[in-house]
Amino acid sequence: QTPSRRVVTNLIQRESGALLGGVGEAERAALAASSRCSLLITAPAADTPAIEDASVALVVTSPPFLDVVDYARDNWLRCWLCGISADEVPVTVVHDLSAWIEAMTDVFLELARVLRPGGKLLAVTLHEHQHEKAVEPYNHVNLGFSRQQLQKFCKQAGLEVQDCTVTAVEKRA
């Protein structure tokens, strides 16, 4: 099956317009100004020397799943729009829970370094669950993280936990 040809520019403009629909002129001007001093880094998140200490106000991240997602393939369009090759972007791929914890500890230590005093970190990850069949095909036993585990993880990186909340729970059939 071959998809029909489309003008990608029109699609991007339409989607961008939808995303910015409620954004006023003052916010648009602020976004345009901030884009001139933005920094695009294609390096491991655990090693970002190009970012100054205590210089970041907000980090929003979703730590990688264990080896169940092909991040290079899933993010090719973002890379293409930025003029970089997805094959050249280093991606952290871990195959077991202990390696994941080690890798994410390094990332959280780096995030603690770049966050300014009073800065915020929003990390979205899998809450603990009992869906053993969901992780079985991937050779790991990670059934998500409890609040206590996440808080310990952040504290080990020197981060003060202000809130650790479950925002959504998958409904069981």
Image (cartoon, rainbow, N blue to C red):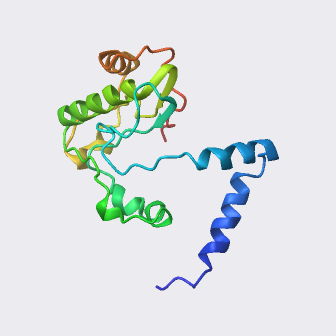
| Residue shown at 57% from the left, 85% from the top | 4
Q: Position of 43 compared to 147: left or right?
A: left
Corner quadrant of residue 156: top left
| Residue shown at 48% from the left, 62% from the top | 82
Decide: is 158 above or below 123. Answer: above
| Residue shown at 50% from the left, 65% from the top | 81
| Residue shown at 33% from the left, 37% from the top | 49
**Nearest the camera: 76 or 115?**
115
Decide: is 104 above or below 83. Answer: above
Corner quadrant of residue 126: top left
Q: Position of 132 compared to 160: left or right?
A: left
Q: Position of residue 38 (x, y in %)?
A: 53, 46
**Nearest the camera: 101 or 60?**
60
Corner quadrant of residue 153: top left
Decide: is 164 above or below 10. Answer: above
Q: Position of residue 117 (x, y in %)?
A: 49, 17
**Nearest the camera: 29 or 165?**
29
Q: Position of residue 152 (x, y in %)?
A: 33, 16
Q: Position of residue 127 (x, y in %)?
A: 41, 30
Q: How many marks?
A: 0
